[in-house]
Image (cartoon, rainbow, N blue to C red):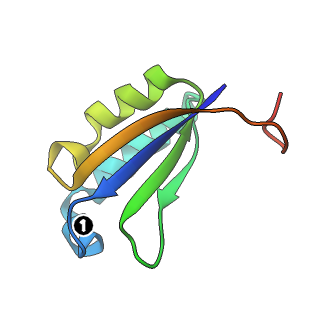
Amino acid sequence: MLHLLFYRFAYADHAVRREPYRADHLALAREAAARGELLLGGALAEPMDGAVLIFTSAEAASTFAEADPYVQSGLVKSREIRAWTTVVGALVK
C-alpha cells in the first residue's frame, strides 16, 4: 500500500521563503527516491499552498517529514500521512 504525505504551507509566499532550504529539501527527496521510498512528489500549483509526496510506507513518509528542512524551519504549517488504496494504474500491484 502506498502512503501520501500532505503538506500545508504556512505562508502565501512559500516559493520565496523556501529558497534557503530548497537545495537540502531536494537532496533529502532525491535520497529517499534513490532508496526506492519516495515515488513522486511536488508542490501544488495555483495556489502553491501545499505539496503531495507519495511514499512506499508510512514509516518512510514520517522519517522524511521529520528530517525535511521545510518542516524544521516552520515553512510547513501542517502535515498528514494517509494510506492510499490504489486500484488502477501503472503502480498498482
- Going by the image, does 22 lie left or right of 83? left
> What is the residue that sits farthest to the top in this orientation?
59
| Residue at x 17%, y 42% (from the top left corner) | 72
The quarter of the image holding the N terminus is top right
Q: Residue at x 15, y 51 (%)?
A: 74
For residue 79, side relative to residue 52 (left or right): left
Residue 79 % position (x, y): 33, 43
Q: How packed is label 1: few (under 14 Cα within 10 Å), some, or many (20 or more)?
A: few
Residue 39: percent from the left, percent from the top? 61, 40
Q: To which quarter of the image does residue 90 belong?
A: top right
Q: State the image coordinates of residue 81 (x, y, percent, origin top left).
A: 44, 34
| Picture residue at 78% right of the left edge, 38% below the top | 91
Q: How far across and down, in percent of the image, does residue 45 sit?
A: 48, 73
Answer left or right for 65 relative to 4.
left
Callout 1: SS:
helix
Amino acid type indicated by mark 1: Glu
Report the number of numbered marks: 1
Q: Which residue is mark 1?
A: 19
Quarter where residue 57 is shown: top right
In this picture, is 76 found above or below 33? below
Q: Nearer the viewer, residue 47 or 65?
A: 47
Rendered-image quadrant of the C terminus: top right
Q: Nearer the viewer, residue 7 or 56?
A: 7
> Please, is residue 87 above or below residue 25 in the view?
above
Q: Would you place residue 62 above or below residue 70 in this image?
A: above
Q: Does residue 14 lie above or below 8 as drawn?
A: below
Farthest residue, direction left: 73
